[in-house]
Amino acid sequence: MASLDDLKKRIASVKSTQKITKAMKMVAAAKLRRAQESAEKGRPYSEKMNNIILNLSSGISDKENAPKLLSGSGNDKVHLCVVMTSDRGLCGGFNSNIIKKAKSYFAKLAEDGKDLKIVTVGSKGNDQLKRAYGDKIIANISFKDSKHANYFDADKVGKMVIEKFGAEEFDVCTIFYNQFKNVITQIPQAQQIIPLNVKNSEEDKSEDSYEFEPDEDEILSNLLPKNISTQIFKAMLENSASEQGSRMSAMDNATRNAGEMVDKLTIEYNRSRQAAITKELIEIISGAESL
Amino acid sequence: MSEEFKIEIVNPEKSFLVKEDVSEVVVPAFEGEMGILKDHISIISFLKPGIIKILSKSGDENYYVEDGIVEFKNNNLSILTSSIFNLTDLDKSKQQDLLKLAEEEAGKPDITDQSKYLVDQKIEILRSLN
């Protein structure tokens, strides 16, 4: 059995770890509120953008000549996957969930005989993917310097994706991120952004006709690149809210576990202290008896 | 019957402005300035750098935008833009910053005709503000 001194030291160390996890939880909670707020505030933009594109693409007369970002390059050979993760660890299953989702998608692509290219956003995803898919990663982007997710950063990623699409480096682009549902639930998502998935279910919407100035094609070709950046920005916002939520619950668990451990160790400490006292007493009494 | 309609300006970060009592909006559409009144036909257009003028009962407002999309439908005007500034908040130093950025872009050798045109517009508008 560990000596009293050792136990004491362990209790102290667990307690100080608990202090750290508790502090991290508080910080995550504060950041979460802000991240959640900006995720909610960012929603109208992407929703409106989606609506307009929906209206536009349903109004477009000849689909053949539609911009390539909408209709695709005609092939389905090379897939570009943008995997968005965080730059920091200690946030529970946040990064692993995205990676897991992405890896199963990669496996499916490999089965279908498609080529794969990966862009990682955030250093944690890069760390986890470079072992298995190192040769497939064509770029790694990290925004360690920016405090919050901002549109400028998203635009950079978007422009890069569009540039690569323009150079015909890939045919289909999918982004991976965590959708924020609540503090304990984040759902890993795979969303295809090129070619754009236009849902035709809302066909009746196209009833009202728009006047376009200039014509549809020009508006669409102006709008679609923006939409890509917007979708990426949305993913970044969702991701940052999810990251903080995930970290908060992970740190909450860690704090609780540390508390349990302290209790257990304290009981053990007290027991061995009592045992030592009892032993000493027995020694004294039996010593006195033998006199 | 009132001659007012609703305007909503959103940027990627947040809903920038919502107003219910707007009587007229002038936007710098791609093919020239466009005034929008109530019961305008549904329209989608995009913006070039310029000034959005909003006339309403509670006072007129002017905003400087660099790009964006306008959608008008059922007396709802939505403007999506990634860079918008209220003119009253746009002080001299900020104007200079924007101007410098634009001039830098205009100086790039590989600029396309269309973006050159847009940047020139930007510079012109920013200069005229001073």
Image (tube, coloured by chain):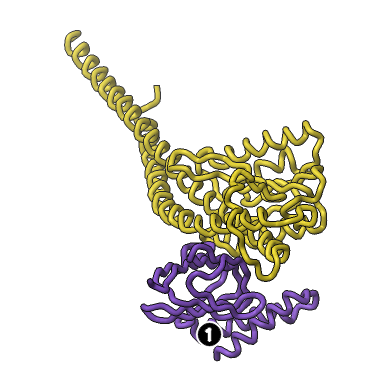
Q: Quadrant of the N terminus of chain A?
A: top left
Q: In the rendered picture of this protein, how many numbered marks are placed on residues?
A: 1
Chain colored purple? B
Q: Quadrant of the C terminus of chain A?
A: top left
| A233, above or below A270, in the image | below
Residue at 60% from the left image edge and 65% from the top image edge: A152
Residue A25 x/y as whole percent: 40, 46
Chain colored yellow? A
Q: Relative to the observer, which residue lies in front, B5 or A31?
A: B5
Mark 1 neighbour density, 10 Å: few (under 14) some (14–19) many (20 or more): few
Residue A232 seen? no
| A186, above or below B32, in the image | above
| Residue corresponding to mark 1 | B93
Residue A138 x/y as whole percent: 76, 51
Residue at 52% from the left image edge and 87% from the top image edge: B92
Residue at 72% from the left image edge and 33% from the top image edge: A107
Q: Relative to the observer, which residue lies in front, A110 or A47?
A: A47
